[in-house]
Every structure is written in C-alpha cells, then in structure tokens.
Image (cartoon, rainbow, N blue to C red):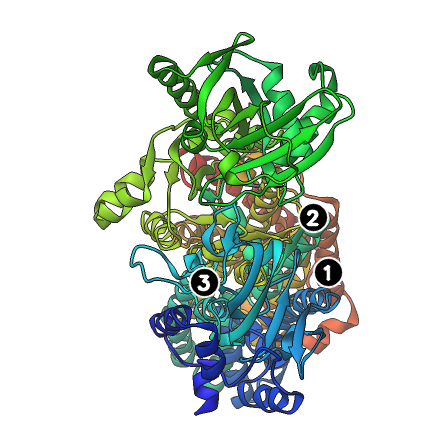
Amino acid sequence: MLKKTMSGHGASTQEKTAALTRYSQMSDQAVYQALKTNPDGLSSTEAADRLEAVGANTVVTQHPRPWYLILLSAFNEPFVWVLAFLVAVSTATADYDGAMMMSLMIVLSVTIHFWQEYRSQKASHALAALIANTTAVTRDGQTQERSMDDVVPGDVVQLATGDMIPADAYLVATHDLFINQSSFTGEAMPVEKRAEVYEQDADISVFDYPNLVFMGTDVISGSGTAVILKTGDATYFGDMASQISGKTDPTSFERGMRAISRLLIGMMLVLVPVVFVINGVTKQDWSQAFYFAIAVAVGLTPEMLPMIVNSNLAKGALAMSKRKVIVKRLHAIQNLGAIDTLFTDKTGTITEDRVVVMRYVDATGKTDPAVLRLAYMNANYQTGWHNLMDTAVVDYVKEHHDEIVDLPAGLEKIDEIPFDFERRRLTVVVANHDHQWMITKGAFEEMLAVCDQVQLHGEILPLTDERKRQLEQTNAMMSGQGMRMIVVAYRTDVHEQRIYTTDDEQHMVMAGFLGFLDPAKPDAKEAVSLLHAHGVRVKVLTGDNAIITQHVAEEVGIPEQAVISGNEVDAMTDNDLLEAVETTDLFVKLSPMQKARIIKTTQGAGHTVGYMVDGINDTAALREADVGISVDTAADITKDVSGIILLEKSLLVLEDGIVEGRRVYANAMKYIKMTIASNFGNAFSVLIASIFLPFLPMLSIQLLLQNLIYDTSQMTIPWDNVDDDTLAKPTPWRADGLLRNALTFGPLSSIFDITTFLFLWFGLGVGAHAASLPAEHMFQAGWFVVGLCTQSLVIHVLRTRKVPFWRVPASAIVVLSTMMALLVGLFLILSPLHKAFDFGILPAAYWPGAVIIVLVYLGMVEWAKAGYLKRGRPWL
C-alpha cells in the first residue's frame, strides 16, 4: 500500500491533480503525518526502504533505450521485410547465392541505421551524465547535498536560488521564493510561491497553487523548505514523459516508404507468377522457371534501397552535425526536407529571447531621458530578483551612457521594498549628500493607484482626470506597438528613517513610461524569406497576445497579419479550423492541446509539418508534427520527442537542414525511380522473351549478378549533385508518380531490349543455332552487356530534369562508379571468368551493334524526358 500511495504509478492525470489538490489544502502537520515524516526529515533507513519501494527519482525519458530495441527498430523497414521474405524463399529453394546477396544488403542497411541512432543516444546520455544534479536533503536532522535520483516521498529539501526542483513538493516555509515554471506554462515571468494553505479556486490550474512546486521547474530567487510528495514517473513531469513515450503516428517518410513498398509488392504479385507460368509451360522445366521467377522478383525490388536511403540519411546527418544540428532519428532529416509548413514558437526562435529598452517617454509619449535615469537608479540598486526588464535597463544605460545626463553622483542605497505579484511594484530608496529619492516602478494600473502628480516638461502637475486619460492613451499607443510597459514614479519628500514599507508607496509623481520589446533576431527576417523561397510557410503558435505577435511577425516578414486566438480555435469545428489553417499564419493565446490540434488539422489538409519549440508544455504538439525540432537547452522530455536538435536556436540553421533534407530525398528518389523503371522494363522484356525464346533469356545467377553490379554502383548516389529546382520546393515522400514514371521509361527500355533480342537472334545468327548451348549462352551474354550498359548509363539522363542532361553533370564519384560498373561487367564477359557464370563468347560484330543500341536508347530517353516534363509531370 505504501508503494502505491507514495509513488502514484498508474494514476491518471486527473487522479494526480486531485491528490495534489488535497495536499495543497492541508496544513504542514497534516502533510508530515500523511507522508509519515517530520521537519527533521526521514531517517536514512526509512529513506533507503522507500527508495527500494518506489524506485529512483527518474522519469521514463531518462532511461536509455536498450541497444537491442534500437536494433529491432532498424529492422522495421518495408524493404527489409520484402528482402527478408525473398531471402527465406531463396533459402528454402536452395538458391543460396541469391539469399547471401540479399542478406548482405539487409545487414549493411540495418547496421548503418542502428549505429547512427545508437551513437546519437549514447552521446546524449553521456552528456547528461556529466551533469550531476543534486539537492539539499534533510535526513536524520542533518542537511547535505544528495543526488536527485535518491530523493523519495517524505524527504525534506532546502531550496535556494538556482536550484532545480527535484520532485513535486509541498512548501512548508518560504522567503521571497520565485519559481520559473515556463517549461510547463509557457509564461516567461516567474511566479511567487508561498507556504500558505491553498483555498480552492476552480478557475486556476494546479501550477498556480501557491504552496506546490514541481519537478522540471527551478528557483529564480529566494529560498524555501519543501516536503517531497511525488517522485519519478508519478510527478507531473513524469506524467508528460509517459504520455509522449507511446507509439507515434507514421511520419511522411514512413508513409511514403510504405506506399512505395506496396507498389513494388503489387508489381511482383502480378509479374512474377506470370513469368513463372510462362517459362514453366514453354520450357517444361518448372524448377528452373521457379528460380528464374525469384530472380525476377529480386530484379523488381530495389534491394539496395534500405542501404542507399540510410546512407543518404547518415550522410545528411553528418553534414548537418557540421552545421550545429544533431539528427537524433535518421528519418527526421528527410522529413525536414519534406515540410511545407513550419510552426514555431515566438520567443527565442524568431525573437532574441530577451527584452531591450525601446522607448522612454513622458506622459505625452515624448522621449524623456529623466525617465530612463530614474529607471536605471531603481534597477541598478535593487538587490532582489533581477527580471529581464531590469537587466535591459542596466545594459541599455551601459551601452548608451551618453544619453544619461545628470546621473546623481555618490548614490547610496537606503532601503528596498521587494516586488510581489499582489502590488506588482518594486521600490528602491537611494540618497546622496544632496537628495533622497524613493523610486518605484510597476504595472500601469497599480502605479496609477499610488500617484497623484505627474511630471510634464520639467514641471510637477496634479494628476487630473484629463491627464489620466492622456496617460491611458500613451500606454495604449505603446502597447499597441507590441511593447511591454512599465511605469516609473518617484518621491523626494520621504522620511529620514532607513526602514520603508508599502505604506510609503503613495502620493508619488509619475515620471513616465518605459517600453520594452523582445526584438526579432537579426537573421530572422532573412531566414523567413529563405524559407518562403524554398516553399516553406512559417506559422507562429504562441501563448502570447495578438499585438506583440503581430508586431514581431511584421518585423520578420510574415505577411499574413490575421490572428486566431485559442478561444476561437476551441469554438471552431474541424472543418472551420481546416479552412483557417490554410489562410492564417498567427495563432495566439494557445494552450498546448490547442497547438496539437492545429498541427494535426494542418496535416489533415495534406501538409507536411515541422514544429520548432523548447518547452515541456509543447511536447504533445511536438509529438504530432512530422518532424519535431528542439534546441540543446530544451528540457530532456522535449529533446527526447524531437527528431532534430539544434545547437543554435536559429531559423537559418533550420533552413540549411531543410535543404539538406531535400538533397537526401532527391538522391534517394533518383535511385528508386530509375531502378523501378529499369527493373520494370527488364521484367517486361523477360516476359516477352519468355514467350518467344526456346530458352531462358538470362539465367537467375546472371540476373542477380547484373543487379549486384548495378546496385553496388548506386552506392555513390548519396554524393550526387542535385538540381537547384529540386532543392527549391518541399519534397514529401510520394508514390503517386512512380507508376507513371515506370510506365513511361520502363517500356522504352523494353523496346531496346527487344531490339537487342532481334539483333542477337537475326543479326548474329543465334536463331539459326537456337538449340545449341553456345548460342544460348552467347545470347545471354549479349543481353547482359546491353542491359548493364543501359541501366548504368541511363542514370546520367534521369538523375536531372535538365535537357540535355550534361547541363548539370553528375558528381565525380557517380561518374567514377558508373565507369567501374561497366568495366567490371566487361571484365566478367571478356575474361575467363565468363565460364563461371555460363556466359558465351561474343563475336566482334556484336560490339558496334551494341554501342549503337545503347546510344540510340539514351537519346530516346532524353527525348521522352523532355516530353514528360513538358506535360508538367513531377520529376522527383
């Protein structure tokens, strides 16, 4: 019972919320009693027993994935299964040569995939291991630093500035404790936590409970004492981790690969039985016909596809690592190239994730250095929590010190009234030998409540209703420009005591406003422009308000300024939202679930979606995207869900990744399309030849040998050049153009195969000696050479959409691999090794004819390509 009660494993989110709510409404003593602990902490013995009962304080994402699971997932590829089936059939029929060749391809492909993902995980966990996270735990009345992994329910922990919260906990004592919960809530501003019993309010979330803190958050300032309630997977952090660790929907890459696999299997199911029956009937050798049919099945399967695709992906991952991008999952690099819609959060992605001083104005909106001077005196001398605005003021003054005139000399701090979220003000009292100032800054409404005068043009005037309206207009005008506002006020007629209280914050003079912005990154506009040029529409999903989001979007060049809020999203039907995502680029005031729904709806409209974010609260949406993108400073859960991790939070880096992903796709699709068309043509040629020839047009071992030489030469495809036109557009995996491509270029290949048959039969006299074994072997050798030459050389025509193809030549390594394939093939035909494969001797008259057939074929393919493109067909 103890284990279930304290760990909470298996409980739903609602049950966990209810349990935490009950704790928050209990007194300190009641919490101690419920957890069977006390202010001096657990005893070491009791802590050890509880650690054994509930387990280590870790969550599911921190557990390394076993190597064997990574290996098994590497086998889970459509073409690996196709090849495995053919290996099984070949082995069962004693076709060991074919089985060994295909087994080798499976091993090489799986090894590349496994090693890349295993190495990425190992590097990630090695990095995490370098960081020894500890917390101050009180046990047996003694407080000392212990590993967070060893914390158990009932432990008493001490919290200080900079500490990570080790687990979900109840606060029994606090002193000006401010917690950063942005990883859960998305709110950049910290929240104050207090050791007071929570009075239930249905309108606030569990994260707003004042006396509860949560794993995954950290202390910004202050101190506190807390009792651990839940650890490990039983925490809210652990609950999120378990929710995202389940099976995800197939990505565009996986859907595309499955479609291609279905097409190939369909082709095999139709053609292979036909070839088997025709050869069995015409040749009366059913055993030989069966082996030949299996060889045709192998010929129809791009058996090197898993290896070539994974080589492409591995090469892309290596290239991206040099550009500060870690590819956690190989498939993600292609998905990155496929996206046509990029959703991103705003803060830190298209903005600098910091605030800067934009304006300092008086009540009328006119620039007034006196306002900046007072704000600097307040920010520089306060010792509490320095928020982003304080830092911005101090940094601005250091950078623009010449704008600060008459800064009082010899200032000494007298006292300070810290900021809190009830009064939303902060006061600093400073003095020199001439004057004393009490300077207060805060939110507009709260500052207006303590001011009865206003400073205008150097004069101090009563704060009349008309001047209040003027202040409201100035505040609204600057807020409308997307700025975050604070008001600065002061008093000089303060008392001489060195102790000040909130009662002194009255009868103040309002000096003016400071406006702050989180400015757009210098490279954000260029990155958005490049992404648009590459066919990627950038959309913003944010919890921020519409005005700020529109301002930033305009700065970075997102043209569509219409916004949809989270409340509007909830009110929309699925069809309404489907229309909205097509026309709207800015979504504001969103909850995590609303973000996930928007992404899923966008995918439903046929788009491939990327999502770039770093907060824990966005993991649900990140999981929905075709490719999740996070940064190295993101939470562990977020990085675990992501397929791409950026070491630099920049859209320019992401744009590089998108282009690299398209290069990966293009080179993989070259192999798929060329091989399917060529193999389809070969199978059709075999079908025709099987009907009319009295012998097999090629032995199974010869057909497998031809495939091996050709496929081995294709291993250089990942290093090929890619057309700029191809890199300019999104490249989702699709099978819809494969059949059309195969039906266009496959039969053309068959026409020249039949031409070769006729040349060999009639031109070289094979027909006159068809019954003799030498004539049969000469025919097979002749078709082997022409087939290998056409397959290997047509690559250079079909690899580019340019006409003629030499306008964009292949890379040097591809040219070299083609030459090597031809040389190996000719060596096998012309050397004594030809006997090992039952090739006959070709007469001298064969070679001129073969050269002419190959050249005419290449010319006809170029002509057919031009017509194919003229009709607007997609090329890759």
- Distance, label 3 to label 2, CA atoms, is 46 Å
Q: Residues within 10 Å of mark 1 (few under 14, many from 20)?
A: some
* Quadrant of image for the N terminus: bottom left
Tell which tag, 2 or 1, sits nearer the viewer. 2
Tell me which numbered mark, 2 or 1, is placed earlier along the sequence: 2
In the displayed structure, does residue 861 sit left or right of residue 593? right
Q: Nearer the viewer, residue 784 or 448?
A: 448
The answer to whether residue 778 of the structure is visible from this angle is no
Amino acid type, label 3? Glu
Residue at 74% x, 62% y is 824
Vertical order, 581 against 13 (above or below)? above
Asked where in the image residue 830 lies, by quadrant, the reply is bottom right
Q: Up-down: is 412 above or below 284?
A: above
For the point 51% across and 20% down, which residue is it? 512
Can you identify the residue that label 3 sits on? 196
Q: Quadrant of residue 149?
A: bottom right
Q: Kindly state the secondary structure of the residue where label 1 is placed.
A: helix
- The mark closer to the camera, 1 or 3, is 3
Depth check, front residue: 595 or 159: 159
Q: Residues within 10 Å of mark 3 (few under 14, many from 20)?
A: many
Give the number of the mark in front: 3 or 2.
Answer: 3
**Location of residue 491 (image quadrant):** top right
Reading the image, the residue beneath label 1 is: 826
Q: Earlier in the sequence, mark 3 or mark 2?
A: 3
Q: Secondary structure at mark 2?
A: loop
Residue 668 spot, x, y in % from top left? 57, 54
Q: Which mark is residue 188?
A: none
Mark 1 / mark 3, whichever is N-terminal: 3
Find disc 2 in the rendering and name its residue: 324
Q: CA distance from mark 2 to mark 1?
A: 45 Å
Disc 2 marks which amino acid? Answer: Lys
Contact check, label 2 and label 1, Cβ < 8 Å: no
